[in-house]
Amino acid sequence: MKQLTICIADDVYDALAYLAQTQYRTPEEQAAYYLLRVMADSGRIKSIDERKADIEARLREFSARREEARRQ
């Protein structure tokens, strides 16, 4: 087994933390789950940079939707 360390933006972490609360997970567990799910869904994306961009885009999209819902 390998260990992976990643750095993410604060808004992305906040989105993961919010998701984690709804799933009874820690933010770290949620991040691992989400990354594995996105990587499985992204079989068409070849490079690491493209995968990273896809993951960040999905998390930012979720963060934006959460902020919009919070404002309403």
Image: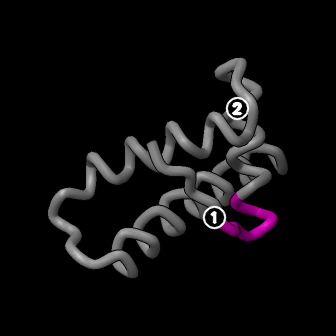
For residue 4, above or below residue 48: above
| 42 over 17 or under it: above or below | below
**Along the line of sight, which residue is nearer the eye, 28 or 11?**
28
Element on which disc 2 rests? helix
Residue 38 x/y as whole percent: 38, 50
Circle 1 residue = 6
Magenta region includes residue 10: yes
- Name the residue located 77 percent from the left edge and 63 percent from the top edge: 11
Circle nearer the viewer, 1 or 2: 1
Instruction: Give the residue type that dot 1 points to.
Output: Ile
The residue beneath circle 2 is 20
Question: Percent x, y for residue 18?
Answer: 76, 38
Give the residue at the far left of this rendering: 44
Q: Is residue 70 left or right of residue 27?
A: right
The residue stretch that appears in magenta: 6-12
Question: Percent from the top left, x then y, of residue 6?
Answer: 63, 64
Q: How many marks?
A: 2
Question: What is the quadrant of residue 25 in the picture?
Answer: top right
* Label 2 Cα crowd, 10 Å radius (few <14 / some 14-19 / many 20+): some
Q: How is the image coloured?
A: one colour
For the point 60% across and 63% down, which residue is it? 60
In the shown orientation, is residue 24 left or right of residue 56? Answer: right
